Amino acid sequence: MEVVKEQKSKNLWQHAWGTLLSDKFAVTSMAIVTIYFLVAIFSSLGFIAADWTKEIGPSYAPPSADYIFGLDIFGRSVLAKTLKGTEVAMSVGLVTGIISMIIGVTLGGIAGYFGGKIDEVIVWFYTTFNSIPYIMLLVAITFILGKGILAVYLALGLTSWVNLCRLIRGEVIRHKDREYVQAAAAIGGGDFRKLFLHILPNVMHIVIINFSLQFQTAIKSEVILSYLGLGVQGQPSWGTMINDAKLELARGNWWQLAAATLAMFIVVLAFNTLGDALRDALDPKLKGK
Amino acid sequence: MNIYTYIMRRLLYVIPVLLGVCAIVFVLFNLVSPDPTLIMLGKHASVKQMAELRAELGLDRPMLEQYFDIVKSAFTFDFGRSWTTKQEISEMIKAGAIPSLTVTLPAFVFSTILSIAISLLVAFYRGKAIDKVVVFACVALMSISSLAYILFGQYVFAFKLGLFEISGYDAGFPYFIPYVLLPILIIVIISVGPDVRFYRTVVLDEVYQDYVRTARAKGLGEKKILFKHVLKNALIPIITFVVIRIPFLILGALLIESFFSIPGLGGITLNAINSSDFPVIRAMTVLSAVAYIIFTVITDVLYTLVDPRVRLS
Amino acid sequence: MAEKILDVKDLVVEFNTDRGGVTAVNGVNLEVFKGKTLGLVGESGSGKSVTALSIMRLIPTPPGNIAAGEIRFRDKNLLDIPLDNMRSIRGNKIAMIFQEPMTSLNPVFTVGNQIEEVLELHQKELSNAQRKEKAIEMLRLVGIPSPEQRIEEYPHQLSGGMRQRVMIAMSLACEPDLLIADEPTTALDVTIQAQILELMKKLQDELGMGILLITHDLGVVAETCDDVAVMYCGQIVETADVKTLFAHPQHPYTKGLIESIPSFDSTSGKVKDRLPTIEGMVPSLFNLPEGCNFQGRCQNVSEKCRGSAGEPKLETIATEHQVRCFHPLS
């Protein structure tokens, strides 16, 4: 019984992977995401854009052959800042995604599996939580935690789990009475064993699709946080660059806005496309739509 | 169970949710947030000054009392006074609601009509080039930061080309119109991407149903099938999606209002955030939560009314 | 000899899929006569539903495409007429009912509304009141009690059997010459099944339409059909009148199908202890064998069947009895 199920799910993943690889857009998106990750890793190790703080020319030098994306107010390379900003963007996406995944899957799984009073409490909690505007929660959390990248991670992570939690809960409810779970119970599986070993692997596709979409939402939200003055301090991020542009634009200095927007556009587009491709590959009932 | 008992039950569930919202607000802003007197008086405040201010702001009262103040405010809309402007918050909200609505309401109506029209069009040509182009354009539009839209729109269309007012506001009809045009346009552009994607999925969910095949077998034309059979089914999720967004209109558009100096609720909220004006932040949070909760109830009730399949049990 | 209503000639339907092109229907010939029922039998994937949808020109294009053949309905080739004319035939001269009574009706319109819609489309001369009257009359005809009230109800308020009755009422509202019924009883309980088949037979006697009944269930065929065509892998493998087919099946596949009907033995007529099944699997349309498509599952298979003599042709072995087999059974 168990072996059959595992083989089946393995084939499903293999098939999904095959579908993904045959989709040109998905492959391009994966390549883009990988490149962004590599840039982020190399920049955090100091191989790329380590000299972003250095003044290399006149203040607000426009883009030219020497300075591809121009220079900022302090004569720093916008290109270097944009590359360095990848570090913040990718880490914000990743950490936020992981935080919301852990909360969403745990609460959703427990609510769906145990049902009854536990379910009622969890549903009440996320309904309540969801009634409070996202931006207010962000603000409150950053008030409490102070400014900085850690606050950004937590603020975005702690406010973005409700949707996943709801999906997982629904899916677990559908799965828990199926034969394979009953079979696991028959051979003496405990509740947590059943939930984590038998049910959750079968709802993994939702987690993956959600993660991909969560990633890009977090990157976009970082811009809003920067605008609210609650963003990352001490190192460049696309959010702070776009936010700086509000004063620069009046003087015609558009390149910082353009560089950060472009860098963000490409990776967010890649994640969006990847999210759609993942949905097509992993959620066959939505196929062809 | 009839519709009235359903509405009653749904309304009863509002109470625990509202109490929960107030609890979260209380925990966030009264319990664990840093001492606001420190923010207001600066680092060099004496202990005595701080104690005085705490007493003045009512922060020295028992915790339970402070919690019930928040709960009470959710029903009376009496939120006290702002710490910075010293105005009655309820008066500030009244004054800000209209300017916010002059931007958000037309933007919402236009973007909803436009998005539904586009989604029906692409559903009609599903799988064809135009569908693919529109879907890609939506994703591309969604991949740009809303802040970039605002900055770029203001810079190019208002500043460079002079087509619109750069910022400002004049109260009263029709004086506000020149000031809200560009903000409306920007909101429409920001919302059309995700909206078309959502409505398209809803419509396509229906297009592949068996009843569509039956309608074809009856001899109905594709247009009639789409606009009569499919649209009436799709309207069920569309209505709920539209209604649940209404409370957000009252709240205004945070970024837009601040960039275009529109004296709406979004701007008030933003100022409060910048000056750590806790009573205003709390008031806006409670107000939006109440609006959201009420509209969820309305959505649920509407759902049972528009969908003949929903049997109340 | 009754009047011939439908004459399908050498119909070929192809589908383009991710894995390449397939021929779902490969040279099918069918004839349906006025007041008679032709049963089209086969396993799922044999191409019987595709054939039916092709007659209505409801094949989703792309990926599907009617590549060759003729579909003559009375004196017209349906494949030649403009789509607008085809629409005026659908639901009017040719009507169709489907397997899924639960989902085939539109959930947000009342039953009456959906019946009246057909009349609105094809009998424009009727007034609103007349349409309503006709809809009530149709519901009464298909045996729905208190039709005046039922007409205001939504599909979800009816049982599966009742919904299929509504589908039948809707399809017969314009008194079509041909009714295509695609597995009309498969999703229903056995007792309801019998009632629906009975009803179709009764209405055929009253209205005189020809019926093309698509089913995988030879039991249903035995009860309701006049003639039978057996489909396998997109081709007709045997066709005969119902008595001949059950008494003297010539194709091993037909024989296998008959033997696997519960409680019926083609030779002794007695209740069987154990049901024989047809061994093996239907070959994939992507990967059909050389020669006879049934070779992998046939007990009488020979070298000839494996491709040395090409594909078997549909041969006439007696009047109105044709079989596609190198080694017919008797």
Image (cartoon, coloured by chain):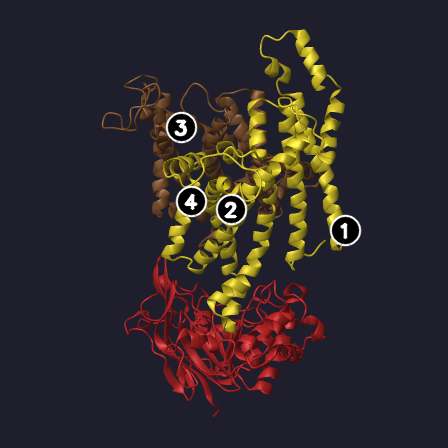
Q: Nearer the viewer, residue B125 or A18?
A: B125
| Residue that mark 2 sits on | A5
The quadrant holding residue A141 is top right
Q: Which chain is brown?
A: A
Q: Are marks 4 and 3 on the same chain?
A: no
Please give the residue where the numbered disc 4 appears in the rendered image.
Answer: B139
Labels 3 and 2 touching (C-beta < 8 A): no
- Which quadrant would residue A267 be assigned to in this image? top left
Disc 2 residue type (three-letter): Lys
Q: What's the chain of the residue with tag 2?
A: A
Of circles 2 and 4, the one toward us is 4
Q: Is residue C275 left or right of residue A238?
A: right
The type of residue carrying mark 3 is Ala
The residue lying toward the viewer, choosing from C114 and A71, is A71
Q: Which residue is mark 1?
A: B5
Tell me the distance, in whole angstroms, between the alpha carbons under discs 2 and 1: 45 Å
